[in-house]
Image (spheres, grey):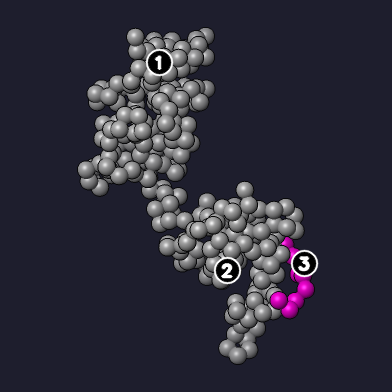
């Protein structure tokens, strides 16, 4: 998908680049690149070549002292008037992209046609990237209750134990069961959440069946939710039974799986 079609209609309210700039060490290459993107603004593609030139010239001229020193605005004028610069800026820009891609920095095109564009992200998304789980409204009665729940899971995905991009999830799909309660809540990472989305949680176990611990963790979460009074409906129970048979068959030569088979609903 091209950068431009993705950005239509988006406006920034939380300035993620300014936030990243405030955290970055002064006088570094990263600081210069962040300044270039702040100057350009969100949703406005910049050609790789233009970034390289701006970056290279600013680095070359920033120590020059005339009229009180050179600014990024002066450099912009110089870029318009100058030819191409050689350099290893390319490598720098690649690692910059790797570092900030999660924060909204996009790239498209190939070779000399590569363009970069920064899309805004919300403060909530920023906090999520930094490890604060997303929590749907209406599940918890208070922030303390929410925090207790997250802490009780050691701040990790209950299935695969990843600690990145976590979210509280409705273990029984909200679109089907319509239940908002800690009794059906589970803490999941982005990957497990995406697998689960609108399907029964057994799908996560199926996807991660080659990891025995994930299978055991599914049993723990599913048992908890059932014990809290929320059994799967007939459709989900049938799906669970089918998946349990598949996973048990996968392990049959290696493990005694009575615990898993006991989860089947008859
Ligand atoms: Zn996970």
Residue 64 shows in this picture: yes
Residue 138: where, in percent of width, then height?
A: 27, 42
Q: Residue at x 26, y 31 (%)?
A: 183
Splitting the image into 4 quarters, where does residue 56 fall?
bottom right
Which label number is shown at residue 81? none
Query: Which tag, 3 or 1, sits closer to the chain's start?
Result: 3
Query: Relative to 110, is 227 above or below?
Result: above
Splitting the image into 4 quarters, where does residue 180 fall?
top left
Range of residues picked out in magenta: 80-88
For label 1, the residue is: 238
Residue 148 shows in this picture: no
Query: Relative to 193, is 135 above or below?
Result: below
For label 2, the residue is: 40
Query: Relative to 10, is 74 above or below?
Result: below
Q: Residue furthest bottom?
A: 67
For label 3, the residue is: 86
Query: Relative to 186, is 2 above or below?
Result: below
Splitting the image into 4 quarters, where does residue 139 fall?
top left
Relative placement, left or right, of 63 versus 167 is right
């Amino acid at each position: 998908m091209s950068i431009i079609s993705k950005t239509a209609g988006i406006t920034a309210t939380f300035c993620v680049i300014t936030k990243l700039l405030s955290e970055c060490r002064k006088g570094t290459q990263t600081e210069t690149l962040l300044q270039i993107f702040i100057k350009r603004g969100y949703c406005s593609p910049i050609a790789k070549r233009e970034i390289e030139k701006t970056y290279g010239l600013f680095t070359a001229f920033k120590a020059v002292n005339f009229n009180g020193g050179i600014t990024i605005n002066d450099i912009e004028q110089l870029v318009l008037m100058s030819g191409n610069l050689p350099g290893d800026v390319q490598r720098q820009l690649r690692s910059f992209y790797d570092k900030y891609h999660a924060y909204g920095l996009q790239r498209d095109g190939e070779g000399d046609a590569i363009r970069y564009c920064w899309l805004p992200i919300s403060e909530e998304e920023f906090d999520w990237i930094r490890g604060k789980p997303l929590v749907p409204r209406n599940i918890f009665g208070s922030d303390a209750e929410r925090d207790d729940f997250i802490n009780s899971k050691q701040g990790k995905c209950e299935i695969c134990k990843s600690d990145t991009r976590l979210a509280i999830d409705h273990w029984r799909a909200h679109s089907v069961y319509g239940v908002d309660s800690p009794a059906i809540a589970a803490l999941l990472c982005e990957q497990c959440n995406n697998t689960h989305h609108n399907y029964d949680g057994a799908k996560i176990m199926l996807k991660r069946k080659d990891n025995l611990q994930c299978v055991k963790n599914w049993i723990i979460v599913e048992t908890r939710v059932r014990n809290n009074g929320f059994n799967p409906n007939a459709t989900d129970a049938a799906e669970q039974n089918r998946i349990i048979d598949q996973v048990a068959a996968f392990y049959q030569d290696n493990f005694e799986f009575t615990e898993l088979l006991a989860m089947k609903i008859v």
